[in-house]
Image (tube, rainbow, N blue to C red):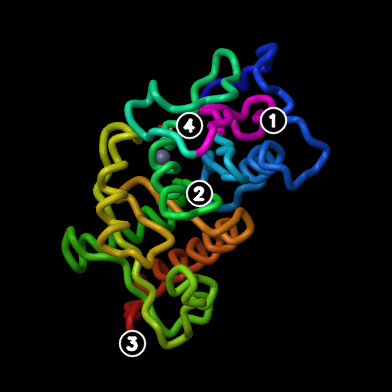
Amino acid sequence: MCPADQTVATNNNDHLVQSEDPEHPANLIPSSVANSTTGDGLPTSIRQGDHIFIAPSGVQKELMQPHNIFVLQWPTPKYPASDRNYIRKPLKLNPSACTPLFLTAFEQGAGCCIHTHSQWAVLVTLLVEREKGPDACFEISNIEQIKGIPRGKGKGMLGFFDTLKIPIIENTAFEEDLTSGLEAAMNKYPDTYAVLVRRHGIYVWGDNTAKAKTQCESLDYIFQLAVEMHKLGLPWVK
Ligand SMILES: CSC[C@@H](O)[C@@H](O)C(=O)COP(=O)(O)O
Ligand SMILES: [Zn+2]
């Protein structure tokens, strides 16, 4: 990762990322990246009205600043990348390589999407592959924390006796190439709010930033618990 670029383009809609409000997306993205507890980097994207705020690619997390944030006018074409409607592009930086995956989550109505390289998430993808085969998804039930995950849009939260199911897609050489796998998983599991990426991490989204963050943290807790349960020979589904 390279150090954050401190250069600010002039006449580049700087006002879109300048706010005293700590809850403004341009402030929330750097602060949540710096304070992440669920994996290195934590690229994040937030939709506020018809603006999408996107973290820069490869910026050291504690150095990310609001003026490093990209802004897209929503809706925007997902492909080709050159057609995307950037209304703010910081000089000498590139938007996160996760951008088309974030846009896929926004197409589904998300207000925020987070990508982490959580080691617990990675370990779970490896355990599922070994125990259940490559096409299986992660499943767990009878764990209190699954009540922190929605049952589906407008369907409330999962209950203690429900089974949480998170699809797993295969990793690709380049982040952008995960997009078709993410789209396929969302079609197959229309109620999911997360997709695991084997040997890589997870994408988690929510109706808004607070929900995406709490769902991300709940899932990280559940994955860590699942790894420990596996070590003790305890089944994930009763
Ligand atoms: C350890 S760098 C891996 C990254 O290339 C990739 O996995 C990723 O998540 C994209 O990161 P980004 O820095 O937002 O472009
Ligand atoms: Zn990644």
In the picture shown, does residue 135 fall above or below 22?
below
**Three-letter code, disc 1:** Leu
Element at label 2 = strand
For label 1, the crowd category at 10 Å Cα-Cα, with few meaning under 14, some 14 to 19 and many 20 or more, is some
Tell whether label 4 touches label 2 (CB within 8 Å).
no
Tell me which numbered mark, 1 or 4, is placed earlier along the sequence.
1
Question: Which residue is label 1 attached to?
Answer: 16
Q: Residue at x 32, y 78 (%)?
A: 233
Q: Position of residue 25 (x, y in %)?
A: 66, 42
Residue 113's label in the rendered image is 2
Q: Which residues are magenta?
A: 55-74
Q: Is residue 66 magenta?
A: yes
Frontmost of labels 1 and 4 is 1
Residue 96's label in the rendered image is 4
Foreground of the two, 203 or 13? 13
**Three-letter code, disc 2:** Cys
For label 4, the crowd category at 10 Å Cα-Cα, with few meaning under 14, some 14 to 19 and many 20 or more, is many
Side (left or right) of 103 relative to 27: left
**Three-letter code, disc 4:** Ser
Q: Residue at x 39, y 33 (%)?
A: 77
Side (left or right) of 228 relative to 132: right
